[in-house]
Image: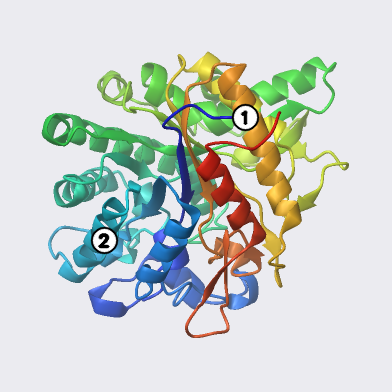
Amino acid sequence: MAFPVGFGWGAATAAYQVEGGWDADGRGPCVWDTFTHQGGERVFENQTGDVACGSYTLWEEDLKCIKQLGLTHYRFSLSWSRLLPDGTTGFINQKGIDYYNKIIDDLLKNGVTPIVAIYHFDLPQALEDQGGWLSEAIVEVFDKYAQFCFRTFGDRVKQWLTINEPNTLAILAYDMGIFAPGVPHFGTGGYQAAHNLIKAHARSWHSYDDLFRKEQKGFVSLPLFFCWLEPSDPNSVLDQEATKRAINFQLDFFAKPIFIDGDYPELVKSQIATMSKKQGYSSSRLPEFTEEEKKMIKGTADFFAVQYYTTRLVRHQENKKGELSFLQDVEIEFFPNPSWENVGWIYVVPWGIRKLLKYIKDTYNNPVIYITENGFPQCDPPSLDDTQRWEYFRQTFQELFKAIHVDEVNLQVYCAWSLLDNFEWNNGYSRRFGLFHVDFEDPARPRVPYKSAMEYAKVIRNNGLEGPL
């Protein structure tokens, strides 16, 4: 079961989730610092990322893990407020630059390709205080930050991700208020944030294209989160239509403007407009792009980055009461098949990733695809013999093999989430996704490989699973 020659095998982390050092060496506060320090049980046991895996001081230990696995790629994110404490280039923190320079240089010295995310949920608090992603002013601020990153690290970094999971961020942070900054704006905030996230990404892509690409010769995209979705009743037209709507709202909402034509899916626009009218709004709650913005947004990705964990079934559910929220606009309910194994929200449905890859190939003109996150957790306390997780990975690799060799999907890189057990947002440290166990009770934060790490290392060495499919 050999993968194509040169296939990229990676693992991923994100700054707030692993670094710690929340106020070390001039780092400014980010929204997750504020959110977790406020308490109120919004995060499991009021845990924080103040120390996390301690990667800010323990990078050498992380590098040992990367080398032990034999990774070809390592995907990490830059802490915006570690580099620019107030989010702007008015003050640049050299200690932050030094930290990321060391990571990048060490990776390259060891033959590992860095994939760098410019922003992964940890907005500088100073920018949130000015409206955050609800304010159009952030589009230019993000573009200037991205240019700073390209200028500072782009001589060595050739694979860039601008904004991690903007579809997750818009809904969980600015519609539902579950993620930092934690203020819900049901039915409005998610769309406003999404609008600005898309424009910020597109602006930064153009900045790379105009100012840096010729010399640096890199590639820029943004990773979109997606659960594969299937109709609950395959024979129900209502459920089929609901599934199409759900895919349009979750994935195509961002992918269609960026990859196809600069604008939202028609189904999304009509659905929100109809709902808004019913609710007494004089116009749609979904902002509109100008013709100039559509031209600016169209074609602003050099590859398709996607993050898959699981699958759900979809059933039509009419919004009879006219309730205001993103989910009510889609008019669906989604749920797992009770026969699927799970830990928390992640159900083991490996065939979903193959269907997703085929959908991307067919819908988005057969792009180069990177899977920039995929993984399965253990509950705390975890077992080093993580057989269930390895089975999830093993079945996933079988499906990726079929996607490449049978469906002829142009998949080039796979990154497991995550290199290390880490701070998993609202779940704190109660969900462990690491290939390496981290002891959060020990100040030294020792890293110990799980069984899945040793098995993944074999896959990387063999460039695929051993034996027949």
Regarding residue 263, the answer to whether it shows in the image is no
Name the residue type under label 2: Tyr
Mark closest to the chain's N terminus, 2 or 1: 1
Question: Residue at the spot x=55%, y=16% of the render?
Answer: 408
Give the residue number, with chain letter if any, for mark 2.
100
Is 158 on the left-hand or right-hand side of 354?
left
Q: Is residue 246 above or below residue 114?
A: above
Closer-to-camera residue (345/417): 417
Picture coordinates of residue 131 (x, y %)? 34, 55
Q: Is residue 295 above or below residue 350?
A: above
Closer-to-camera residue (61/37): 61
Picture coordinates of residue 196 (x, y %)? 35, 40
Among the 4 quarters of the image, the one containing residue 21: bottom left
Between the C-alphas of marks 2 and 1, the distance is 36 Å
Q: Is residue 397 above or below residue 141?
A: above
Picture coordinates of residue 371 (x, y %)? 50, 37
Is 466 on the left-hand or right-hand side of 150?
right
Identify the element where label 2 is drawn: helix
Among the 4 quarters of the image, the one containing residue 228: top right
Within 10 Å of disc 1 (Cα), the crowding (few <14, some 14-19, many 20+) is: some
Question: Residue at the spot x=71%, y=73% of the render?
Answer: 381
Which residue sits furthest right? Answer: 339
Q: Is residue 117 above or below residue 242?
A: below
Regarding residue 107, the answer to whether it shows in the image is yes
Numbered circle sitting on residue 1: 1
